[in-house]
Image (cartoon, rainbow, N blue to C red):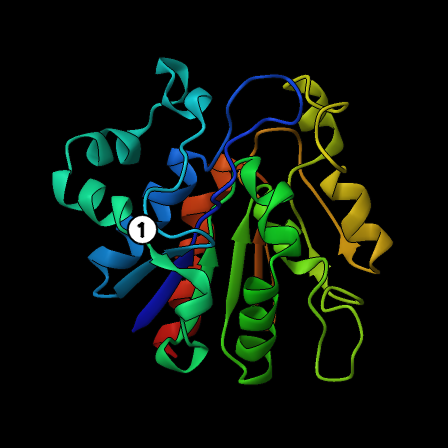
Amino acid sequence: MKILFVLTSHSELGNTGQKTGFWIEEFAAPYYILKDAGAEITLASPKGGQPPIDPSSAKPENQTDSTKRYDDDQNLQQLLAGTQVLSEVKADDFDAIFYPGGHGPLWDLTNDASSISLIEKFWASKKPVAAVCHAPSVLLNAKDENGDALVNGKNVTGFTNTEEEAVQLTDVVPFLLEDELKNKGGHYSKKEDWASYVVKDGMLITGQNPASSGEAAKQLLEILKK
């Protein structure tokens, strides 16, 4: 089982002067679930090297068993500091692709040509594509084998408009993910804010928020073990 994790390289939270990046829980929980199951995981990002971490995800109220394990895991932190450059990664080398969220992907991975190309190649090869929280934004510009929007007609979820409102970033983000998934023809559904919710449609797995990241990894594992 070889899995490619793709992380954001974007660190600026719009024009606020604050920082963003990837959300630790959405990286750590899936990473450990898949790693503990025997997966070989490669980390990549558009710029390579250390991807920016959303400082909010390191706050005490956002800590989980997975983030605490990450904090004590020097080996993983070293791996993270040396992510591969995304444009140099080949889809043929992996069995699945996983995108942790955080607000960063809204700005870079959504429009990243290498990321879009990878997703389309995984999809064409009938390999699973998984994304959680804000990371389903990476699907917005990907197309299926017919040239249609990849999410068109698919059951999907992602960070909700009301969750964005709750973190007071509705007017900061470049777009609202819930709205854009619907605009692209996705059959969007959600649960109450901050509840774990994962939607699987064939080889496509999407999770609503940080709490959904572990379950998304478990559903990916189920597909890979078949």
Q: Give left or right: position of 120 versus 225.
A: right
The answer to whether one can see residue 33 in this image is yes
Give 130 or 196, whichever is nearer the viewer: 130
Instruction: Return the residue at label 1.
Output: 31
Q: Circle 1 — which element?
A: helix
Q: Quadrant of the N terminus?
A: bottom left
Q: Give left or right: position of 1 versus 96.
A: left
Q: Which residue is drawn at 56% across and 79% down?
A: 121
> Does residue 152 sit above or below 71 in this rendering?
below
Q: Residue 13 at x, y = what percent?
A: 59, 26
Give 88 or 174, whichever is nearer the viewer: 88
Q: Residue 126 at x, y = what percent?
A: 54, 82
Q: Residue 87 at x, y = what percent?
A: 46, 66
Q: Which residue is drawn at 31% across and 72% down?
A: 2
Q: Residue 199 at x, y = what percent?
A: 61, 55
Q: Which residue is drawn at 37% across and 52% down?
A: 48
Give 148 or 207, whichever is nearer the viewer: 148
Q: Which residue is drawn at 67% across and 27% down?
A: 163
Tell me the crowding category of disc 1: few under 14, some 14 to 19, or many 20 or more residues within 10 angstroms, Cα based: many
Q: Quadrant of the C terminus?
A: bottom left
> Does residue 92 sit above or below 157 in this rendering?
below
User: At label 1, which amino acid type do we have?
Assistant: Tyr
